[in-house]
């Protein structure tokens, strides 16, 4: 069974950098069959796709983030990480890591989610 | 970018009711649409992919239809475990999600 788990600080100061890590078990981030993705859900709102990483190292991001996000792999630990720079209160959300199918972009496995609050 | 809307935002229903939720895309997305169920404090669960295909293990009371810009998710006979929020996701161009429909007890 594939499992994903997010980890990282629950509180980040305004204008600083948010960093989260997703630990994967039951599959490999080096697998070419899936994208490894970050998705967030602001309190009381809908889901927002942040971006994804492919095993080749290529990435794609939501244009609304204006280049502030980076997703990178750590294949030795079977993890992938999200970095989001220059955060504001609007970045407060539950952050999920997830596995996304490459053929139908269905999200078949999600982490439990981790709340990140941005505050001065 | 492609915007997704859903209706209704909230729906009150009883056990055994037939429930239909609609999802509309701002442009033609063919059948590039998936549906999810989310319960409070939990990660979402994939229900249907490519508009109408049931994911493994999902009960057959769930069904999906549509193509182009208009889609629907139907629960044929609502069960207690179905009270949740449902949302759609398009992947014709990047990934965007609908805002969700909360189904609660009448």
Image: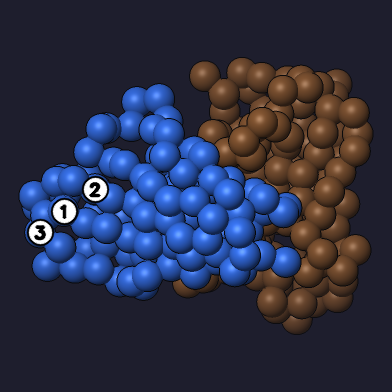
Mark 2 vs 3: CB contact within 8 A: no
Task: Point out the frontmost of discs 2 and 3.
Answer: 2
- Residue shown at 34%/51% (left/top)? B73
Mark 2 vs 1: CB contact within 8 A: yes
Q: The numbered mark 2 sits on a residue in which chain?
A: B
Left or right: residue A40 versus residue B57 is right
Among the chains pictured, the one given blue colouring is B
- SS at mark 2 in the image: strand
- Quarter where residue A88 is shown: bottom right
Q: Which residue is mark 3?
A: B14
Residue B75 - label: 2
> Is B106 in front, or is B29?
B29
The Cα atoms of the two marked residues, 2 and 3, are separated by 12 Å
Task: Point out the frontmost of discs 3 and 1.
Answer: 1
- Residue A93: x %, y % from top left: 61, 65
- Quarter where residue A36 is shown: top right
Q: Earlier in the sequence, mark 2 or mark 3?
A: 3
- Residue A61: x %, y % from top left: 81, 54
Q: Earlier in the sequence, mark 2 or mark 1?
A: 1
- SS at mark 1 in the image: loop
- The 10 Å Cα crowd at callout 3, few under 14, some 14 to 19, many 20 or more, is some
- Residue shown at 27%/32% (left/top)? B59
Q: The numbered mark 1 sits on a residue in which chain?
A: B
Q: Which residue is mark 1?
A: B18
Left or right: residue A17 versus residue A38 is right
Quadrant for the C terminus of chain B in the image: bottom left
Discs 3 and 1 share one subunit: yes
- Residue shown at 15%/63% (left/top)? B13
The answer to whether residue A110 of the structure is visible from this angle is no
- Residue A96: x %, y % from top left: 61, 49
Q: Is residue A103 above or below residue A45?
A: above
Q: Colour of chain A?
A: brown
């Amino acid at each position: 069974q594939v499992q994903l788990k997010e980890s990282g600080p629950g509180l980040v100061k305004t204008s600083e950098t948010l960093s989260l890590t997703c630990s994967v078990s039951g599959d490999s981030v080096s697998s070419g069959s899936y994208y490894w993705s970050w998705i967030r859900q602001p309190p009381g709102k809908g889901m927002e796709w942040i971006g994804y990483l492919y095993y080749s190292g290529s990435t794609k991001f939501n244009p609304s983030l204006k280049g502030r996000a980076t997703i990178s792999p750590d294949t030795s630990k079977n993890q992938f990480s999200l970095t989001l720079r220059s955060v504001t209160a609007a970045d407060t959300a539950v952050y999920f890591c997830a596995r996304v199918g490459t053929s139908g972009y269905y999200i078949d496995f999600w982490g439990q989610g981790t709340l990140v609050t941005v505050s001065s | 970018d492609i915007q997704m809307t859903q209706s209704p935002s909230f729906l009150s229903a009883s056990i055994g009711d037939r429930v239909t939720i609609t999802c509309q895309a701002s442009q033609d997305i063919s059948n590039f649409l998936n549906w999810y169920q989310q319960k409070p404090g939990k990660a979402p669960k994939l229900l249907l992919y490519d508009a109408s295909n049931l994911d493994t293990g999902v009960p057959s009371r769930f069904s999906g239809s549509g193509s182009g810009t208009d889609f629907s998710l139907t629960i044929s006979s609502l069960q207690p475990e179905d009270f949740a929020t449902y949302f759609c996701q398009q992947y014709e161009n990047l990934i965007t999600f609908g805002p969700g429909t909360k189904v609660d007890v009448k």
